[in-house]
Image (cartoon, rainbow, N blue to C red):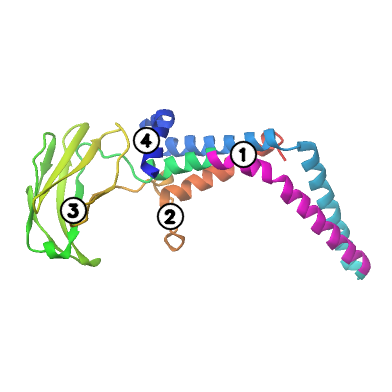
Amino acid sequence: MANVLARMMDAVLGWVLLLPRDLGLLVVAALTAALIVGLRRWTTDQSRLARFRADRRRLRMLLREARRRQDRDATRRCRVLLGRLGGRMLAAEFRPLLASVIPVALLAGWCFERLPFLPVVAGRPLEVRLYHPVTASGSFVHLVPADGLDASDGWIRPFAPDPAAPSAAVATWQLTPEHDGLVELVFRARGRRLVHELPVGRRGPVRAVIRHEGPAPCASQLVLTPRRLLGVVPGIPVLGIPPWLTGYLLLACGLVMAGKRVFRVA
């Protein structure tokens, strides 16, 4: 389902994949910020939100003064008023949140499918893997020779137990694309024909992993280079956040704050 939606969004955002690494991230972050700021300005009463924020600042100042004077009644009143004001401010956030859910979700879904990795570059080695149930260990798989590809370790490779997954076997190839274009990787394994498309150069989206259904489910993988902002911004593995997402969130949050300040959006 996610890949189908991403293909639909390619008609609108596919050109972003032709941009350099950091510029592509900057563009989608700017689009996200424009959606959030624009929809917020359009769906909210800005003067009312500004009054809410001014009242909150004033109440917080009065609360600090009441605490300093040790005036319990004034402290309680300020807290009650702050609670009521917070409820009204939260209710005012509902419309912009509702309006932005679908467009931002579509944009984010496309990013998750298309931006995690850098494009495959001609002349740069690429590791390709084919995973199969562990019962395939010791058998061989044939990657059909393709025009524009060089296999430094041969086209026929054995399945071996995967150290990272005891229930799986894996065969690996070291390939070097020789020129830009769309290459079709065709695996012949245990009587099956499996296909994984490999776009070389900035010619379209790359699917890092394709799962092949059948009597013995297996998967083919392209070991791609993760996309990193400025080439160095890391991910947060503990939270499951990949490097590209860290850069995207940093840019988008910064642009949202800048956009709200420039266009005076509360």
| Side of 151 relative to 74 (left or right) | left
Q: Quadrant of the C terminus?
A: top right
In magenta, the rendered stretch is 73-102
Residue 53, position as x, y percentages in the image:
79, 47
Above-or-below relation of 119 to 219 = above
Residue 99: assigned label: 1
Q: Give how far apart the Cα atoms at labels 4 and 1 are.
A: 23 Å
Inter-mark Cα distance, 3 to 2: 26 Å
Q: Earlier in the sequence, mark 1 or mark 3?
A: 1
Q: Main secondary structure of the magenta part?
A: helix
Q: Which amino acid does label 4 sit on?
A: Arg
Q: Does the magenta stretch include residue 30?
A: no
Residue 16 lies, with reference to residue 130, above or below; the image says above
Residue 79 sits inside the magenta stretch = yes
The residue identified by callout 4 is 7
Task: Inspect this view and state whether residue 2 appears.
Answer: yes
